[in-house]
Image (tube, rainbow, N blue to C red):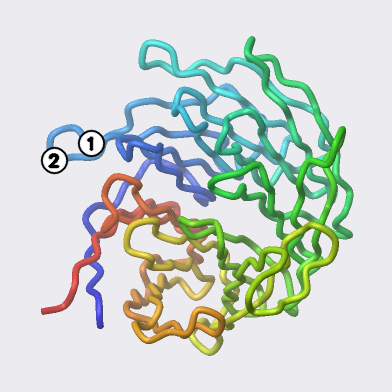
Amino acid sequence: MAVNMECLATLKGHEDRVWCVAWNHSGTLLATCGTDKVVYIWKLEGERWIRSSVLSDGHSRTIRCVTWSPCDKLLTSTSFDGTTAVWDRKNGEFECALTLEGHENEVKCAAWSPSGQFLATCGRDKRVWIWSIDDDSDYECSSVLSSHTQDVKSVTWHPHKDTLLSTSYDNTIRIYEEQEDDWECISVLESHTSTVWAAAFDKTGQRFASCSDDCSVKIWQEYLPQNKEGVITPGNHSTWKCICSLSGYHQRTIYDIKWNNVTGYIATACGDNSIRIFSESADSDDNAPSFQMIAQMKNAHNEDVNSIDWNPAKPDMLASCSDDGDIKLWRLSSEV
């Protein structure tokens, strides 16, 4: 099966490199951020995508990541200034409600738990912070996790429970869960041979995909205690095992990866300026799956592709951004 990729729109406005794109959960708003220290909110008006909001007073340095809360009322932005800003959307307008401090330097990523009770941040200081949010919208640091030995590039929550995953310059992926009164690293996953830039769960939460500076994508699967496959599970925790590696497709670092909850497609953003789409083969083995590349948009951008995100409401739509300063919207369609 092959898939066509068509560029629907190119959104211009950022003055320099664009680091991140993030759809809200209803797929109606797209948040973007970059080196120009500005967050833009884009929406469709008629047949044109316009900037509906400009958030410019939250940070003093590059904004690295934007992410929406589960209810879409809050937006977080993380910055090289060492802070995380929480923007509150009131009456359609965004206001900086508070600024979270604690990281020693650059904050690389933030992610909300599916329950909305926790916010995780990570940074160059090798640490993962977990913030708890109470009913009065007060933020309190629940834990500071120093498991990684190098920069932490990304944090990602399990889609159905409060389990956190982080990726790092130390070539590892680490998994955390709350144990009694504190959060602990319960698993260290090693398979990549260079920096792990990002990871993305599938809709079930039983698998996730990771991408790396080693130019590979790896598929990981969860094995619960007393699993029928006989995979050993230390203690009472699940074991995550690399069950597939996709190599030879990417020519440079893979910076981002996203798993489509509807189609099951995996999209990658690469330093070779390209976007690739992968799909699991129909006759794939659950414990040793095979994936095929079904689309490749070479030179999707003029420079590195830094971030991608599937639209939650339109599973055939993908957003991307690049060092070239552009944001692009893509539509996928099956070849006849």
Q: Toward the viewer: 252 or 281?
A: 281
In the rendered structure, the answer to whether residue 291 lies left or right of residue 9 reads: right
State whether residue 104 appears in this view: no
Decide: is 195 above or below 85: below
Which residue matches tag 1?
Answer: 44
State whether residue 85 appears in this view: yes
Q: Position of residue 223 (x, y in %)?
A: 66, 68
In the rendered structure, the answer to whether residue 56 lies left or right of residue 155 reads: left
Asked if the residue under mark 1 is in contact with the one under mark 2, i.e. CB atoms within 8 Å, the reply is: yes
Q: Toward the viewer: 122 or 50?
A: 122
Give amino acid for label 2.
Glu
Residue at horizontal 66 percent and vertical 34 percent from the top: 119
Give amino acid for label 1.
Leu
Residue at horizontal 78 percent and vertical 41 percent from the top: 178
Residue lying farthest bottom?
248
For the image shown, how many numbered marks are present on the structure? 2
Q: Toward the viewer: 58 or 201?
A: 201
Q: Residues within 10 Å of mark 2 (few under 14, many from 20)?
A: few
Q: Position of residue 82 (x, y in %)?
A: 76, 35
Decide: is 314 above or below 13: below
Which residue matches tag 2?
Answer: 47
Q: Quadrant of the C terminus?
A: bottom left
Question: In the picture, residue 240 is in which quadrant?
Answer: bottom right
Q: Quadrant of the N terminus?
A: bottom left
Mark drawn on residue 142:
none
